[in-house]
Image (cartoon, rainbow, N blue to C red):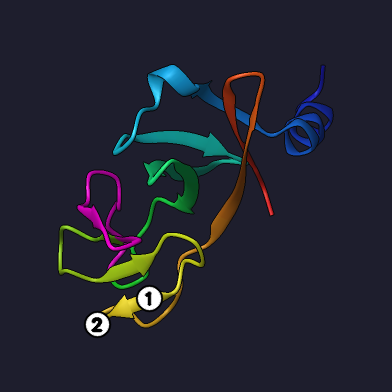
Amino acid sequence: MNEAVQSEQTALRGVQVGEVAALPEGSQTEVQVNGQSVVVICYEGRYYALRNNCTHKDFALLGGEVSMGRITCEKHGAKFELATGKAKVLPAVKPVKIFATRVEDGVVWVDAL
């Protein structure tokens, strides 16, 4: 299968993250969506997916503290809203890209937006 067809099929089907049982409350997992690193977070029983990249200084968000519906960049303390990607605390002012998540048959998926 050529890369263009495979890429199109992945975009339509989404990217499998893993089974719900392996992604409990508070978990953070990294997946690749169309060549972009994406962090998938389970927070208050929902799954959120954001580009794994702080818009302030190009630092990974994976591993940052999650509280009050936000993830904190460990490098300079910028905070991003999980549901919208909006920057909520300086020094970041630009939002991070978000991705749709869904659960089907006990498996978490991320879809490109």
Residues under numbered marks 2 and 1 in contact, where contact means CB atoms less than 8 Å apart: yes
Name the main secondary structure of what is drawn in magenta.
Answer: loop
Relative height, residue 101 to residue 58 (above, below): above
Q: Quadrant of the N terminus?
A: top right
**Residue 40, picture quadrant:** top left
Instruction: Identify the element where label 2 is drawn.
Output: loop
In percent of width and height, residue 23 lies at: 39, 26
Going by the numbered disc 1, the residue's amino acid type is Ala
Relative height, residue 12 to residue 68 (above, below): above
Q: Mark 2 points at which residue?
A: 90
The residue positioned 37% from the left and 57% from the top of the image is: 53
Tell me, yes or no, whether the highlighted magenta stretch contains residue 34: no
The image's mark for residue 87 is: 1
**Residue 24, picture quadrant:** top left
Horizontally, residue 90 falls left or right of residue 109, namely left
Instruction: Identify the element where label 1 is drawn.
Output: strand
In percent of width and height, residue 76 lies at: 15, 69
Q: In which quarter of the image is the C terminus?
A: bottom right
